[in-house]
Amino acid sequence: FNREGFPVVDHYTYALCGDGCLEEGISYEACSFAGTHELGKLILFYDDNDITIEGDTDITFKEDVGMRFAAQNWQVLHVDLVSHPDDVALIAKAIEEAKAEKSKPSIIICKTKIGYGTPLEGSHKCHGSPLGVENLQKTKEKLGWPCTEAFDVPAEVFAHTAEAGARGAKKEEAWKAMFAEYEKAYPELAKAYKAAMSGEMVDLTKVEDLFKWEKPMETRQTSSVVLNKIAALVPELIGGSADLAPSNLSDMKNTDTITYGDFAPGHYEGRNMHFGIREHAMAAITNGMQLHGGLRAYCATFFIFSDYCKHAIRLSALMNIPVVYILTHDSIGVGEDGPTHEPVEQLIALRSIPNMKVYRPADGKETAAAWISALTGTAPTALVLTRQNLPQYENSGLAALKGAYVLDDCDGTPDVLLLATGSEVELCVKAKAQLAEEGVKARVVSMPCFEEFEKQSDEYKESVIPSAVKARVCVEAGSPYSWYKYAGDKGEIVAMSTFGASGPAPLLFKQFGFTVENVVEKAKKSLAK
């Protein structure tokens, strides 16, 4: 958006951290990424007080932080606030030095003494515990703070705060005046900027191309097709993978009219990001981009590695950050990589996060609906996708936005319900046909998103999963724990109760009971209860 004379977006990003923060693995991942990408507008303050909850950092942390950051291509600045605890001018000077470095992020290492001015100064005892009434009084006396009130804010502090607010308001008015001129000079860019910052989204339900599918495809492939069609309509879409883009199929591909390119030093307008093998930082960085505003951010990795992203995913949900997580290779269908790479418990782990949408689509139209859902609302969304081909269904489509729907029904009231997600929907469709040959009426319910289904009215839920039909089979190549609610007392569950194994995917599905014959057998067993 920036043009000569119009710095529409020109702010810096500041972060604060302590000793404990830099012991966390994510700090290495994120800071390595920032240094590699020469993010010169990132300024990190490090409160270096040599204390954590258990005591001096010497017991756990002896590295030279400055050398570590220099090795990661950061500018390293030092401020001694032990010798000069009240000299804010030193901090201001360091900030200006950081701003002057355009090709590296900067860390300002502030040497401090924890608990400054208190009787517990320099001790871990004041790290996470209240000072107490007596120590608080002694601290006030030492610092010359008013002691008559339990909590007192001097008038000077209010005045200083008001002055800072006035400075900010003045800068905001100057920016608005500049943007008004920008609108005259670049009306289309200004319109696009305001649209991006407002978060308004194209009505993707009316994009017919998203719902035209013919041949069987992996849902990671259908996701790639949908992603690229959406990318052409949503210029603020940006994202990438943790070194798995060729497998996740998560890149936005260049076309005759659009060159997406890579986000890289000297090319920050690129929309494809290379996060490297840094899953936790990738998810956290994506949260930050989405929180900034003006962007629609996604990231991608193998489903099994969502465990590395878990805390950042949880924060997405907690903070209402609508990040899209593309998670491929969703089951024992991974095959020869074996149980270390075959998700089992990951579905229930993500479904258990409040305010999280987990979609496991069964075909291209369900994948399109999942993407549409992901780009609307404030909740994060996980797209759990296959590596193996799945058929396309005539009756699938926007009904998937309701989380579950009748995909393949029988005449009249069904004898048994067959419920499934993703790749196992195909088993249920084939089992329904076999049961019909034996005089058993079955209904196939596709349930791509439990969370969206639970938001529907009681009437709708009853129309899809009628309570009077007690015979049920729930089928999913993951942990069974998501399904007990829907199976009921007489239902059967075909799921993964153990880890997977190494071998060709078709052989593994057969070994673990994911066959038409087993689904039919379970249906008969449920009917007999």
Image (cartoon, rainbow, N blue to C red):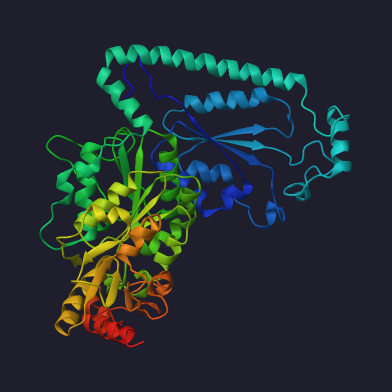
Decide which of 109, 510 is in the foreground and name it: 510
Camera-side residue: 306 or 216?
216
Q: How many marks?
A: 0
124 in relation to 408, above or below: above
The image position of residue 20, as x and y in percent, is 62, 50
Q: Residue at x 30, y 70 (%)?
A: 419
Q: Is residue 249 visible?
A: no
Indicate left or right for 62 with 245 as reference: right
Please state, as top left, top right, bottom left or bottom right, where the C terminus lies in the image: bottom left
Left or right of 318 in this view: 138: right
Residue 497 vs 382, above or below: the answer is: below
Compared with 187, 115 (above or below) is below
Q: Position of residue 200 (x, y in %)?
A: 33, 34
Q: Is residue 16 left or right of residue 396?
A: right
Residue at 65%, 18% (x, y): give it: 162
- Residue shown at 63%/52% (left/top)? 62
- Asked whether 159 or 198 is in front, the reply is 198
Instruction: Find residue 434 and report its image quarter.
Output: bottom left
For the point 45% across and 31% down, the residue is 41
Instruction: Pinpoint residue 240: horizontal percent, then vertical percent.
Output: 32, 47
Residue 6 position within the rendered picture, expressed as x and y whole percent measured from the top left: 36, 16
Q: Is residue 217 visible?
A: yes
The reply, left or right, for residue 226 in relation to residue 101 is: left
The quadrant of the image that shows the N terminus is top left
Q: Does 370 sit above or below residue 488?
A: above
